[in-house]
Image: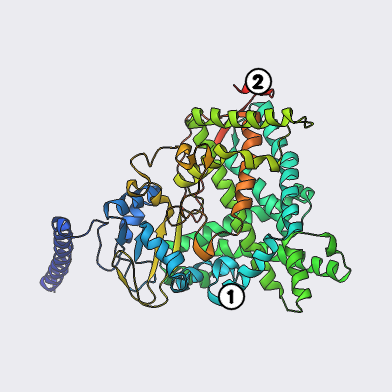
């Protein structure tokens, strides 16, 4: 019996040894033959290239950018066996223009993206395709281009900047305290989206519930993003059993949904009493439009639209501004040029005899050509949405010759594009606003080269308002304060749908003299 047990143990050890040697031999073969295959992460049996992704998760955007550049602009990604993950990543402008414009109809968001964001975004404009998307886009465009809604956007923006953002910044400046500027900007843009989207009173944000709702949006988005790096069968099991990040997502969504359903119910009562004719927020506009067209818009549709609106406008602008201000702390020469441009606007206002010439307003922003270029350059290096996902509806051949089967999931890296010499030249990693100017006037690049606001039919309808918001916030903060990054602060991107800074942006605010002459 003892000899039998020893023999069985020996056989088991031999099996493990054979398996280990086989795996080691395979890895060595992969490494030795790497010169004969396309550059890219090591592809393992069963799990594909996923181990390399996990290994570089802390630097995923920089690492993936380098891999894509070394791969010639497009990488054939090997996902784990029997999973529905993306299988191609590209930064090639030819491929991107083909997907988002030339053959737009054949490259929807697709089932993979939809399944991940279904719980959070529902059937909102950011998560639907085809006729559903076209219908939602038409409705949103008509509202965004209405005169009273645009006036409401501008009025709300000016009021919130001066009544909510600046007082907090001034208090931090006077106390000398270190402030997380990213957190401050996220809160400001969240409040802005809630006022213009839901018609909330700014004073409502002083209540504890507002803080809880804001945090719920953060938690829901973080939990949803985790689905990209967890095999679908696993996160769906976690959702079914209600644990881990899926439990966090469920709790957050319950809070958000409850809040919005109460708000929608309240607005319906106002609509019956003709109270919405004085309202110009998105929710009221949607409900009045549905009534005028005698169409039924249920609460779930309204709720999903509101959630998509907040997600589209809250994080994108705040993230963009955070990176912009950080870049200014690293590039004082750019900051001086922006200050000089502000001084020029103030001097022109004084020459026209305008009262309170230093009180810059939204209409002054169109004169800020260099500032517009600096914001665009910041977004080039640190796009708010670093990646975009697509799926192939029918068999397709990309401009680079790759054949894509029906149902193929793929993505393009906007972050990686900004670091490609083949697209932006040898100075692509430099913060250089001048690359956007021609004889002092801002000149936009082709969307296929710069898809920061998406491109083609799905280009962001709120792009102009986003620039307006960013420019006004930038001008009023830069004019009043000199920002200094806290000692020892390390600024790196955080994994997510939006390019947040992992540790926030810790700065101290120092007062500037407010007379134009002191800006020299």
Helix, strand or loop for disc 2: helix
Q: The C terminus is located in which quarter?
A: top right
Q: Position of residue 171 (x, y in %)?
A: 70, 31
The one nearer the camera, 133 or 3, is: 133
Which of the marked residues, 2 or 1, is nearer the chain's N terminus? Answer: 1
- How packed is label 2: few (under 14 Cα within 10 Å), some, or many (20 or more)? few
Q: Position of residue 86 (x, y in %)?
A: 38, 66
Tell me, yes or no, if residue 493 can be seen here. Answer: no
Helix, strand or loop for disc 1: helix
Please state if 220 lies on the left or on the right of 268 as rendered. left
Q: Position of residue 323 (x, y in %)?
A: 52, 41
Q: Which mark is residue 517?
A: 2
The quarter of the displayed image where residue 93 is located: bottom left
Cα gap from disc 2 to disc 1, whole angstroms? 55 Å
Q: Residue at x 31, y 63 (%)?
A: 77
Q: In the current view of this chain or complex, which residue is farthest to the right?
A: 273
**Depicted 346 relative to depicted 189: above or below:** above
Please state if 439 lies on the left or on the right of 41 as rendered. right
Q: Residue at x 67, y 24 (%)?
A: 516
Q: Position of residue 89 (x, y in %)?
A: 36, 61
Q: Which residue is mark 1?
A: 132
**Depicted 419 relative to depicted 387: above or below:** above
Contact check, label 2 and label 1, Cβ < 8 Å: no
Please state if 265 lies on the left or on the right of 39 as rendered. right
Q: Residue at x 64, y 46 (%)?
A: 469
The one nearer the camera, 514 or 489, is: 514
């Amino acid at each position: 019996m003892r000899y039998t047990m020893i023999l069985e143990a020996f056989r088991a050890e031999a099996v493990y040894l054979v398996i280990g040697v086989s795996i080691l031999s395979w890895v060595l073969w992969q490494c030795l033959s790497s010169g004969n295959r396309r550059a890219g992460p090591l592809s393992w049996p069963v799990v594909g290239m996923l181990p390399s992704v996990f290994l570089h998760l802390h630097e995923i955007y920089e690492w993936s950018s380098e891999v894509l550049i070394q791969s010639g602009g497009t990488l054939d990604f090997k996902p784990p066996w029997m999973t529905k993950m993306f299988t191609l990543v590209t930064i090639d402008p030819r491929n991107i223009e083909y997907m988002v414009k030339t053959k737009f109809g054949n490259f929807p968001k697709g089932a993979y993206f939809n399944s991940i964001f279904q719980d959070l975004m529902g059937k909102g404009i950011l998560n639907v395709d085809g006729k559903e998307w076209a219908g939602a886009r038409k409705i949103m465009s008509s509202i965004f281009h209405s005169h009273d809604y645009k006036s409401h956007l501008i009025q709300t923006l000016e009021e919130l900047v001066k009544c909510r953002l600046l007082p907090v910044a001034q208090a931090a400046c006077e106390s000398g305290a270190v402030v997380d500027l990213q957190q401050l900007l996220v809160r400001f843009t969240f409040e802005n989206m809630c006022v213009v989207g839901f018609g909330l009173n700014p004073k409502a944000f002083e209540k504890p519930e507002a803080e809880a709702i804001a945090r719920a949006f953060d938690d829901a988005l973080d939990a949803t993003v985790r689905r990209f790096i967890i095999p679908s069968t696993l996160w769906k099991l976690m959702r079914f059993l209600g644990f881990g990040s899926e439990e966090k997502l469920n709790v957050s969504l319950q809070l958000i949904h409850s809040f919005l359903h109460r708000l929608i119910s309240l607005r319906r009562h106002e609509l019956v009493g003709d109270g919405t004719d004085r309202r110009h927020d998105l929710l009221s506009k949607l409900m009045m439009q549905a009534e005028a067209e005698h169409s039924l818009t249920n609460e779930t549709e309204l709720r999903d639209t509101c959630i998509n609106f907040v997600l589209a406008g809250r994080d994108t602008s705040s993230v963009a501004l955070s990176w912009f201000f950080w870049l200014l702390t690293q590039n004082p020469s750019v900051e001086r040029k922006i200050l000089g441009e502000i001084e020029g606007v103030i001097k022109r206002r004084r020459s026209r005899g305008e009262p309170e010439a230093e009180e810059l307003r939204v209409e002054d922003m169109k004169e800020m050509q260099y500032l517009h270029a600096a914001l665009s350059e910041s977004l080039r290096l640190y796009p708010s949405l670093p990646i975009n996902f697509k799926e192939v509806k029918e068999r397709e051949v990309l401009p680079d010759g790759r054949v894509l089967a029906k149902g193929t999931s793929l993505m393009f890296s906007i972050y990686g594009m900004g670091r490609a010499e083949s697209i932006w030249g040898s100075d692509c990693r430099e913060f250089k606003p001048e690359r956007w100017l021609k004889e002092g006037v801002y000149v936009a690049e082709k969307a296929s080269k710069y898809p920061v606001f998406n491109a083609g039919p799905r280009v962001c309808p709120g792009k102009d308002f986003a620039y307006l918001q960013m420019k006004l916030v930038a001008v009023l903060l830069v004019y009043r304060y000199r920002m200094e990054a806290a000692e020892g602060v390390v600024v790196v991107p955080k994994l997510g749908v939006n390019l947040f800074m992992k540790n926030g942006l810790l700065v101290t605010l120092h007062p500037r003299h407010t007379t134009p002459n002191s800006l020299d």
